[in-house]
Image (cartoon, rainbow, N blue to C red):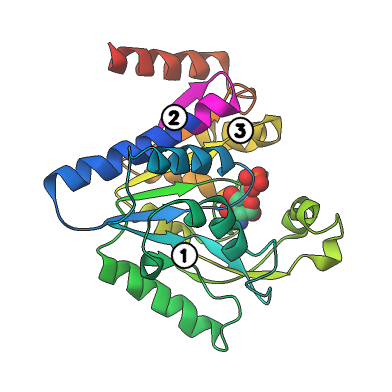
Amino acid sequence: MKVIIRDNAHEASLWVAHRIAAAIKAKAAVSDKPFVLGLCTGSTPIETYAELARMVAAGELSFRNVISFNMDEYVGLPVEHPESYHSFMFRNLFDKIDEPRENIHILNGLAEDLEAECEEYEKAIVRAGGFDLFFGGIGEDGHIAFNEPFSSLSSRTRVVTLTDDTIRVNSRFFDNDPNLVPKQALSVGVATVLSAAEVIVLATGPKKARAIQQSVEGPMTHMITVSALQNHPDGIIVVDDAAAGELKVNSYNYFKAVEAAENR
Ligand code: GLP
């Protein structure tokens, strides 16, 4: 696992945007096959999406040959609800880039048969060729997508029940009323994320510091599902100084030294 540390959230977000852009361009240079990208929601990726949108507007990048799959969606929330992950993604990214509508995949939390919806999602990912890159965020408890503590590290796309902690944290988007937060969601599994050739997780701010410390320095455990990234050959955690705040000084210095050596 690599950890990239930037001074602030802005720099960390730009690092991720430029890495995604470089990966899309690198594949386009050698192949006609679409680039398959996993995407996340939350407040963390907003600046990364803004930078990707800026690059598209400036003619520096195109999503015409990108197929995307979002990580998760609430169960039972109308698509038009401002806090649905559908709304979020169109507002922050899809309305601003040139990705064809038919290439955009987001789980349908209103499907009549939720299990069939999840099974079909996994099949669609395989049909698309599998993920080239998965871009994720984490919850304060170290969940990736909506893989809450105790999720199997071999889990695939499925219906999940949110923890009280996540409901409380996410209530900030629902008038601070936990009762308005859906209790269930559809989420790709930990194994779905780890099936990507490359996984990039962005975490910023002091509220993520504990989860980052546990997932980087602690053991791999279903209690902190992002810790499964330790078992991925190309996993990168990108943090700002605040989210790196609980790492040991030695770990912090090591990751900085690795990056400096690679850029030499
Ligand atoms: C939700 C999403 C996660 C996201 C997390 C963090 O729980 N399901 O995919 O990573 O929120 O959100 P934020 O970036 O707002 O801290």
The amino acid type, in three-letter code, at marker 1 is Ser
Q: Nearer the viewer, residue 235 or 99?
A: 99
- The CA span between labels 1 and 3 is 26 Å
Camera sees residue 73: yes
Specify the quadrant that holds the C terminus: top left
Residue 247, quarter of the rendered image: top right
Q: Determine whether, in the image, residue 94 is placed left or right of residue 206.
A: left
Q: Which residues are magenta?
A: 1-13
Extreme-left residue of the structure: 30
The amino acid type, in three-letter code, at marker 3 is Thr
- The CA span between labels 1 and 2 is 29 Å
Q: Which mark is residue 204?
A: 3
Q: Nearer the viewer, residue 220 or 201?
A: 201
- Disc 1 under 8 Å from ligand 1? The reply is no
Q: Which residue is mark 2?
A: 15
- Residue shown at the point (65%, 31%) measured from the top left: 209
Q: Determine whether, in the image, residue 215 is placed left or right of residue 197.
A: right
Q: Secondary structure at mark 1?
A: loop
Locate residue 46, reporting x and y percent. Answer: 58, 43
